Image (cartoon, helix red, strand yellow):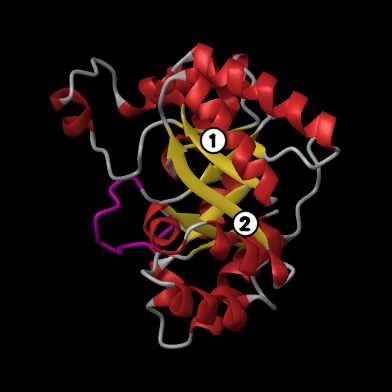
Amino acid sequence: MKKNISASEKLIFALDVDGYEEAMKWVKKLKDYVRVFKVGKQLFTACGPNIVKEILKNDCKVFLDLKFHDIPNTVSSAVIETAKLGVSIITIHASGGRKMIEKTRKDVDEFCAEKGIPVPLIAAVTVLTSISEEDLAEIGVGFTAKEQVLRLAKLSLESGADAIVCSPLEISFLRNSLGNNFKIIAPGIRDRGTKDDQKRVMSASDAIKAGADYIVVGRPIRNAPDPISAAEKIIGEIAGSN
């Protein structure tokens, strides 16, 4: 059975900034509205684990989006370190394969049980939202985006992943194909008509209606004239779509 998630926890704000001060400015500004903050490669490279610890001190959760993709032992060890930090969600690349995901699942579960600490949600990234059909063909993937997402999602769930990261356009397809017994995290959330480097996008309300458990939003809030109002608007859309 799927655990109910509040509207404010379904919104993950992407801290795609280049330093500690800028990141914590956004945490302090939005923490009364947003409960989960995404730390990606840029911010983690700039600040290291300390940024995670500071966000947690503000009574917020961390989605650590580092998209680990390496040999099984390396990924397993890295995810164990994220569990020590106390992150709620960590991403790995589904294309790392069955052995990588299975070892990570097994080792992280055993470590957290031994230490008595919470197990982070392991989310498998399928096809990036910036990737188009033409991009897939260029790198030698002989499937459509939907087909590749389904193949990677099925493999990931069979191997022990808790959640799937996919574009909003694949949410309904995955729910219809694989059911409801897993979480879906959807980046690529944009107002209708917005054009940028994200190619497979959808509005917040439509993504939740389609079956997303979490949506990741950065620029639509960060670049808004009134970021708090923008966050409240999205949370309202989420609440109205459940």
**Viewer-side residue, 22 vs 188:** 22
Q: Amino acid at mark 2?
A: Val
Q: To which quarter of the image does residue 152 belong?
A: top left
Q: Give the residues drawn in magenta, as a range.
A: 189-200
Verify CB contact (< 8 Å) between mark 2 and mark 1: no
Q: Position of residue 98 (x, y in %)?
A: 51, 13
Q: To which quarter of the image does residue 78 belong?
A: top right
User: Could you say which disc has been placed on residue 60 in the image?
Assistant: none
Q: To which quarter of the image does residue 103 belong?
A: top right
Q: Residue at x 18, y 18 (%)?
A: 140
Q: Is residue 99 left or right of residue 7?
A: left
For residue 44, above or below residue 232? above
The local secondary structure at tag 1 comes to: helix
Q: Position of residue 38 (x, y in %)?
A: 53, 58
Tell how many labels.
2
- Residue designated by label 1: 78
Q: Residue at x 80, y 48 (%)?
A: 4
Q: Position of residue 221 (x, y in %)?
A: 46, 73
Q: Amino acid at mark 1?
A: Ala
Count residues near mark 1 (Cα–Cα under 10 Å), then give few for <14, some for 14-19, many for 20+.
Answer: some
The local secondary structure at tag 2 comes to: strand
Q: Is residue 139 left or right of residue 25?
A: left
For residue 129, above or below residue 46? above
- Residue designated by label 2: 62
User: Residue 25 in magenta?
Assistant: no
For residue 49, above or below residue 170? below
Q: Residue at x 67, y 42 (%)?
A: 83
View extreme (left): residue: 138
Dominant SS in magenta:
loop
CA distance separating discs 2 and 1 = 16 Å
View extreme (right): residue: 116
